[in-house]
Image (cartoon, grey):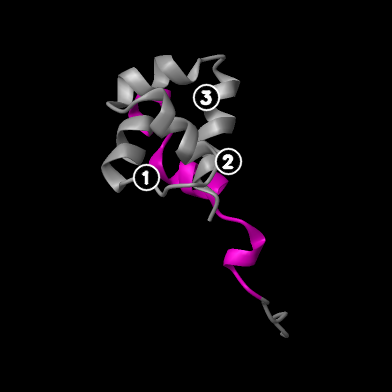
Amino acid sequence: MDFGKAFRELREEQNLSRAEVAKQIGCTASALSKIERGKVIPKHVTIETFCIMMRVPLAGFYFRAFTMEDFGSVDPIHY
């Protein structure tokens, strides 16, 4: 999963600065930068707060965060 990519994409889509988002979700701009660069994994409550602020369903956030590598190889279904 790439939580940082999801955080960064959503923040940039809404043209918000790291400082603005960090203040709203209760962390520092430095901590948010570390999340966005994949240096730390955010707590679930931080993700929830971020989603509420961005008005994005939690499932939508996780959809962005998952990568194909998270699913591994998938065998085709034969009918």
The numbered disc on residue 78 is: none
Query: Considering only order in the chain, which callout, 3 or 1, is on the residue closer to the N terminus?
Result: 3
Q: Which residue is mark 1?
A: 42
Name the kind of residue labelled 1 in the image: Pro
Residue 27 sits above or below residue 47 on the image? above
**Residue type, numbered disc 2:** Lys
Question: What span is colored magenta in the figure?
Answer: 51-72
Q: State the residue at coordinates (41%, 14%).
A: 20
Indicate the position of residue 52 as horizontal and vertical percent values.
34, 28
Indicate the quadrant containing the C terminus: top left, top right, bottom left or bottom right.
bottom right
Q: Residues within 10 Å of mark 2 (few under 14, many from 20)?
A: some
| Circle number at residue 5 | 2
Q: Is residue 42 magenta?
A: no
Pick whichever, 64 or 37, lies toward us: 37
The vertical placement of 56 against 1, above or below, is: above
- Image-quadrant location for residue 45: top left
Secondary element under disc 1, as helix, strand or loop, is loop
53 relative to 38, above or below: above
Residue 22 screen position, x and y as percent: 37, 23
Q: Earlier in the sequence, mark 1 or mark 2?
A: 2
For mark 3, give the secondary structure: helix
Quote the CA–CA distance across marks 3 and 2.
Answer: 10 Å
Determine crowd level at label 3: few under 14, some 14-19, many 20+ residues with C-alpha closer than 10 A. Answer: some
Q: Read off the residue under disc 3.
A: 11
Query: What is the spatial separation of the Cα atoms under label 1 and label 2, in whole angstroms?
Result: 12 Å
